[in-house]
Amino acid sequence: MIIKKQKMSSVAVLVLVAGILVLIVMFYNGYGKYVERIEQVSRWGFYDLIPDSYLSYLASDGGSWVAFIIGVGLIIVSVRLPKKTVEIPVVIPAVEQEIQKKQSRADELIKYKGILDSGVLTQEEFDAKKKELLERST
């Protein structure tokens, strides 16, 4: 089984998502207010008061600054939270499993060859083990 490691705790992920959501809501609400402001100013004829851009409008809006600071703060906190390693089991495809089986049989054969060379096994015993391993592979 292959193990992957993840370097972010679930609390850090939740804080990161919360920070991103705060920023998204800030931009969404800010854009709604921006469009409303343009319509209002245009209706009254005060064209000089129309903000140059959406970002300049957000920069002048105090609530957007607060939401921006909170969102960025949450993102920074999520990055600074203690890291936790999580082991995740991964299913290995059949081809990889077959390769691992063949490698383990080859390792076993090498082990028995070392035992044969050291004199603990006889040639007949080694041949019997070798035949058993090769039969098991098919």
Image (cartoon, helix red, strand yellow):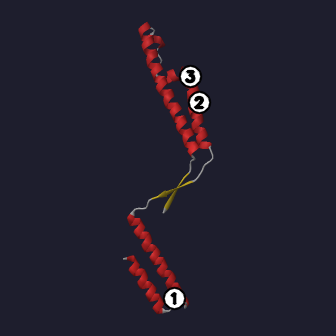
> Would you call the spot at circle 1 few (<14 residues within 10 Å), some (14-19), or many (20 or more)?
some
Q: CA distance from mark 2 to mark 3?
A: 10 Å
Q: CA distance from mark 1 to mark 3?
A: 80 Å
Q: Is residue 109 above or below residue 31?
A: below
Q: Which mark is residue 69?
A: 2
The amino acid marked with disc number 2 is Ile
SS at mark 3 in the image:
helix
**Residue 6 visible, this orientation:** yes
Mark 2 vs 3: CB contact within 8 A = no
SS at mark 2 in the image:
helix
Q: Quadrant of the C terminus?
A: bottom left
Q: Which mark is residue 63?
A: 3
> Would you call the spot at circle 2 few (<14 residues within 10 Å), some (14-19), or many (20 or more)?
some
Q: Comparing marks 1 and 3, which lies closer to the viewer?
A: 1
Image quarter of residue 12: top right
Residue at 48%, 79% in the rendered image: 108
**Residue 52 visible, this orientation:** no
Q: Which mark is residue 62?
A: none
Please provide percent x and percent y for residue 89: 49, 58
Q: Is residue 103 above or below residue 37?
A: below
Please provide percent x and percent y for residue 28: 46, 26
Q: Which mark is residue 116?
A: 1
SS at mark 1 in the image:
helix
Badge 2 or badge 3: first in the primary sequence: 3
Left or right of 135 on screen, residue 114: right
Query: In the orientation shown, which residue stands out farthest toward the top?
Result: 44
Left or right of 18 on screen, residue 101: left
Mark 1 vs 3: CB contact within 8 A = no
The amino acid marked with disc number 1 is Leu
